[in-house]
């Protein structure tokens, strides 16, 4: 056995083998996979082998598309068969909401170049004649759907990797991973120790145990899962062509042809987590005992939907465990705080996603960044707040809702509230309807006067409409208050702080007492953050950005650390409130003896508000006159008391994120993970106006940004007013120009201030002219969309800057 390698991958399931293949494909051949038994000895061997592209997250859907197209390449390279069956697949909709979701997915597929199709019941009946069409509204057909041979495919990945120099060591259990002071690893196995520069955890069913060897908690959990293979069925074996896959979300089932019969699997509601206290090391090629009781209701439903099943005999039952992360997406990438340790686990659909996961991880390791935004699968999307006690109920919820409709305004209830601020009870008493972000409870809106205390999930305008409008108007006409807890916040201190920031951030770093907005770029010029930098003194800066991205950002800061400054994640150590609206200044004045009148737009000051020491900065994402007031969490309730009491004569109104996201539309402010994400560059999104090309620093991404300046990108961000009816843009709706799909929406919503439906979209630069009239598809209907360039609120910026 080799004693050293550049990369040691632990785990020879489909995911580990895909990572191995992609590392070699991208040029690293000194790579090694270590497997405790034979390849496929975890979940992989008993998978049903189905694959499909449909995924609510657009980047995941694209990676699934990549994975599916890769199998042909593997077969060509290796001469091995992956046992591919491109039978096509239909996802059924048995109610209008589910149909709405499929129509919205189809709309996204238009610009993604996926050839899916919405079908009516009659067309479904022709393609999948064993389906009882009672109650079926329609379905989505995807010609790419199909299935394969799990073992053959895994071995094809392995062979392709070996052909490019990779090594595979089977029957070699890893027992320890110990980091050396230089950041490299000693991977201790039953056959000896391997010195590796990088370790990849692809331990699948044992990923938790493998992670624990390095002191890491991997937030995933195995669930039991069962599928049944039937005896021969004449309606199947008498067909001229293979029966397509049919996913019946109403019945929690997926079905496909298997030989001359059918195979049907279930995501049953009475599901069961497996291996709660760990996966036994001696678990191998055995299956779990059949459990028909657990899937009794699902089977009864399936007999109704596919009557041929009722009379078919059962040939075999496969019941085995596989792992899920709390949101069902993989856990991929560099583990924060652990140098050269990479995660490739939590992949619950290895045959739809494994190729994409391997490609992304290999790009990340070799090139330093991925070709697309991988936030949805980034292991750092969970922070140190996550525990097994949170993961388990969330994984159960995810399993149970695997085929449920997922709505853009939906808030899933399991494991909540998890983290709360000192304001939780106060806001609840004021009617707060809570959402959550990165484990934290965040107010969506305050229910009053008969507003719903639970926002009904929908693809259309929700019943939080009145509450949102009321809060928007309160801000625009008086003064609103909300928490600033859900900002990611960093403190940068030390003599090298300014120089470090100048290198990390593309924009101008402000002078003491001032703030600036700046993009943070990747080396290839993608957006890795949109930051507000506040200079508290020459050696102390506060950064604010997305709360949900705080660990992703912190990881980047650590990877690019300097000896001359310290960067602390203070997201939960600094909290406070934002006050915004025409009376915000009067409110602040009523709460402090410090001078307020002289605070200019983008000033930052230390102030005493009431009896609390605060950092006050004049800026507001509402686009209005506003102040962000930061304090220690221990002081937050005292600060609230001061602001709330002083604000009573002014009609102070608490507002939530629904209002905030409406208010920002009035000034076309972009938002992280919507307009701004690693999928886009600064010049595409207008963030280039904050880049300081004048500064004499080779900031990260400079060369790429300069190149874009010389040669502007093909697409650009614009805003539209949409003639919408009862549904507004959410994200990724296609934009038609001259009847062709020319772009897509990044986000949108309803401006309650201007009473207009607004969309923000990336369109070809040549079309981004004043007066552009396009069409945007919302809920299957095209709506006229007229470009707007003048802000809907405060176009001359007297409120914001005055
Ligand atoms: C019943 C069932 C049906 C399924 N159907 C489908 C389907 O139709 N389509 C689909 O896409 N997915 C399906 N899946 C899910 C699929 O099986 C998984 O997504 C996939 O197998 C995950 O692969 P993996 O490589 O991450 O993990 P695993 O397959 O669990 O591989 C992990 C490997 O790591 C090895 N290992 C662990 N610890 C060590 C160590 N310390 N030292 C050395 N080696 C170690 C293990 O031996 C194992 O071989 C199904 C799962 C089940 C249970």
Image: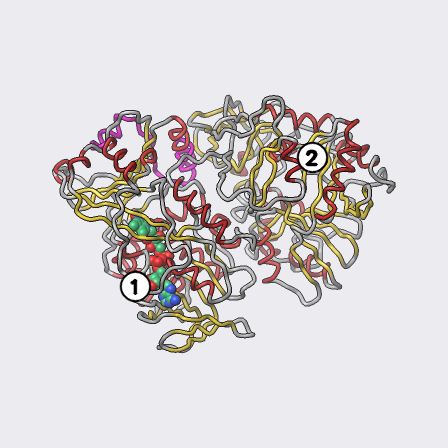
For the residue carrying disc 2, how many other residues have a C-alpha within 10 Å: few (<14), some (14-19), or many (20+)? many
Asked where in the image residue 279 lies, by quadrant, the reply is bottom left
Q: Quadrant of ligand 1?
A: bottom left
Q: Is residue 505 visible?
A: yes
Q: Is residue 42 magenta?
A: no
Q: Is residue 69 visible?
A: no
Is residue 630 placed above or below 501 in the rendered structure? above
User: For the residue with label 2, is its CB less than 8 Å from the closest atom of ligand 1?
Assistant: no
Residue 741 pos. (x, y %):
44, 34
Residue 499 pos. (x, y %):
71, 61
Please tell me which residue is depicted at 40% across the width and 39% down the height of the picture. Answer: 401
Numbered mark located on residue 608 in the image = none
- Compared across the picture, whether 522 is left or right of 68 comes to right
- Closest to the camera, between mark 2 and mark 1, is 1
For the residue carrying disc 1, how many other residues have a C-alpha within 10 Å: few (<14), some (14-19), or many (20+)? many
Residue 639 pos. (x, y %):
76, 41
Q: Rounded to the nearest whole Å, what is the CA distance between mark 2 and mark 1?
A: 56 Å
Q: Which residue is mark 1?
A: 39
Q: Nearer the viewer, residue 571 or 532?
A: 571
- Give the mark, 2 or 1, whose residue is nearer the N terminus: 1
- Compared across the picture, whether 294 is left or right of 563 comes to left
Q: Nearer the viewer, residue 116 or 490?
A: 490
User: For the residue with label 1, is its CB less than 8 Å from the closest atom of ligand 1?
Assistant: yes
Please tell me which residue is depicted at 31% across the width and 35% down the height of the picture. Answer: 251
Q: Is residue 113 magenta?
A: yes
Q: Which residue is mark 2?
A: 623
Quarter containing the N terminus: bottom left
Tell me where the magenta segment starts and ends, as one range.
103-131
């Amino acid at each position: 056995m080799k004693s050293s390698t550049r990369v040691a991958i632990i785990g020879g399931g489909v995911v580990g083998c895909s990572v191995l293949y992609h590392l070699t494909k991208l040029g690293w051949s000194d790579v090694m996979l270590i497997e405790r038994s034979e390849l496929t000895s975890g979940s992989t061997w008993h998978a049903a082998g189905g694959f499909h592209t449909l995924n609510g997250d657009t980047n995941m859907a694209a990676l699934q598309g990549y994975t599916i197209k890769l199998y042909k390449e593997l077969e060509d390279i290796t001469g091995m068969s992956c046992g591919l069956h491109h039978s096509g697949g239909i996802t059924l909709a048995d109610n209008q909401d589910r149909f709405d979701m499929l129509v919205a997915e189809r709309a996204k597929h238009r610009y993604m170049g996926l050839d899916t199709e919405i079908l009516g019941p009659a067309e479904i009946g022709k393609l999948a004649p064993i389906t009882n069409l009672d109650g079926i509204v329609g379905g989505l057909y995807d010609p790419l759907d199909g299935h394969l041979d799990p073992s053959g495919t895994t071995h094809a990945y392995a062979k392709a990797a070996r052909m490019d120099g990779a090594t595979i060591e089977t029957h070699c259990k890893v027992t320890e991973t110990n980091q050396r002071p230089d950041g490299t690893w000693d991977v201790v196995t039953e056959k000896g120790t391997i010195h590796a520069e990088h370790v990849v955890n692809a331990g699948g069913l044992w990923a938790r145990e493998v992670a624990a060897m390095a002191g890491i908690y991997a937030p995933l959990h195995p669930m039991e899962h069962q599928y049944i293979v039937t005896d021969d069925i004449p309606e199947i074996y008498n067909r001229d062509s293979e029966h397509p896959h049919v996913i019946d979300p109403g019945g929690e089932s997926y079905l496909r042809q298997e030989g001359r019969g059918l195979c049907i699997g279930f995501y049953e509601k009475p599901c069961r987590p497996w291996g709660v206290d760990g996966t036994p090391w001696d678990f191998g090629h055995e299956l779990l005992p059949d459990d028909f009781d657990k899937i009794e209701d699902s089977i009864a439903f399936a007999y109704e939907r596919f009557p041929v099943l009722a009379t078919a005999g059962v040939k075999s039952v496969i019941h085995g465990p596989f792992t899920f992360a709390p949101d069902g997406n993989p856990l991929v990438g560099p583990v924060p705080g652990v140098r050269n340790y990479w995660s490739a686990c939590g992949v619950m659909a290895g045959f739809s996603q494994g190729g994409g996961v391997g490609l992304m991880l290999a790009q990340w390791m070799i090139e330093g960044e991925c070709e697309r935004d991988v936030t949805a699968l980034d292991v750092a999307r969970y922070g140190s707040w996550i525990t097994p006690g949170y993961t388990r109920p969330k994984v159960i919820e995810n399993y149970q809702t695997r085929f449920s409709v997922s709505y853009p305004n939906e808030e899933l209830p399991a494991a909540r509230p998890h983290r709360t601020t000192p304001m939780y009870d106060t806001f609840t008493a004021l009617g707060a309807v809570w959402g959550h972000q990165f484990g934290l409870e965040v107010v969506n809106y305050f229910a009053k006067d008969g507003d719903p205390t639970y926002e009904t999930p929908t693809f259309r305008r929700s019943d939080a409409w009145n509450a949102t409008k009321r809060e928007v108007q309160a801000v625009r006409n008086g003064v609103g208050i909300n928490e600033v807890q859900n900002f990611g916040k960093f403190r940068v201190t030390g003599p090298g702080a300014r120089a470090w920031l100048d290198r990390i951030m593309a924009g101008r770093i402000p002078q003491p007492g001032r703030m600036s907005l700046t993009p943070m770029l990747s080396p290839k010029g993608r957006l890795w953050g949109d930051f507000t930098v506040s200079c508290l003194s020459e050696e102390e800066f506060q950064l604010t950005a997305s709360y949900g991205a705080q660990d992703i950002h912190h990881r980047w800061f650590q990877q690019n650390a300097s000896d001359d400054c310290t960067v602390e994640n203070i997201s939960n150590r600094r909290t406070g409130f934002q006050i915004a609206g025409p009376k915000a200044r009067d409110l602040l004045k009523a709460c402090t003896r410090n001078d307020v009148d002289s605070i200019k737009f983008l000033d930052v000051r230390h102030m005493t508000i009431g009896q609390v020491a605060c950092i006050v900065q004049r800026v507001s994402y509402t686009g209005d006159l506003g102040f962000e007031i930061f304090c220690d969490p221990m002081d937050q309730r005292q600060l609230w008391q001061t602001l709330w009491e002083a604000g009573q004569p002014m009609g102070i109104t608490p507002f939530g994120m629904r209002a905030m996201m409406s208010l920002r539309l009035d000034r076309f402010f972009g938002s992280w993970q919507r307009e701004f994400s690693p999928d886009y560059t600064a010049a595409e999104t207008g963030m280039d106006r904050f880049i300081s090309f004048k500064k004499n620093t080779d900031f990260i991404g400079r060369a790429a940004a300069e190149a874009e300046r010389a040669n502007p990108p093909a697409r650009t961000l614009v805003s539209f007013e949409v003639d919408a009816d009862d549904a507004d843009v959410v994200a990724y709706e296609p934009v038609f120009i001259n009847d062709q799909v020319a772009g897509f929406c990044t986000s949108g919503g309803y401006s309650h201030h201007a009473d207009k439906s607004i969309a923000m979209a990336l369109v070809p630069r040549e079309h981004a002219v004043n007066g552009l009239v396009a069409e945007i598809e919302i809920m299957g209907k095209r709506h006229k969309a007229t470009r707007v360039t003048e802000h809907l609120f405060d176009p001359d910026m007297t409120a914001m800057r005055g």
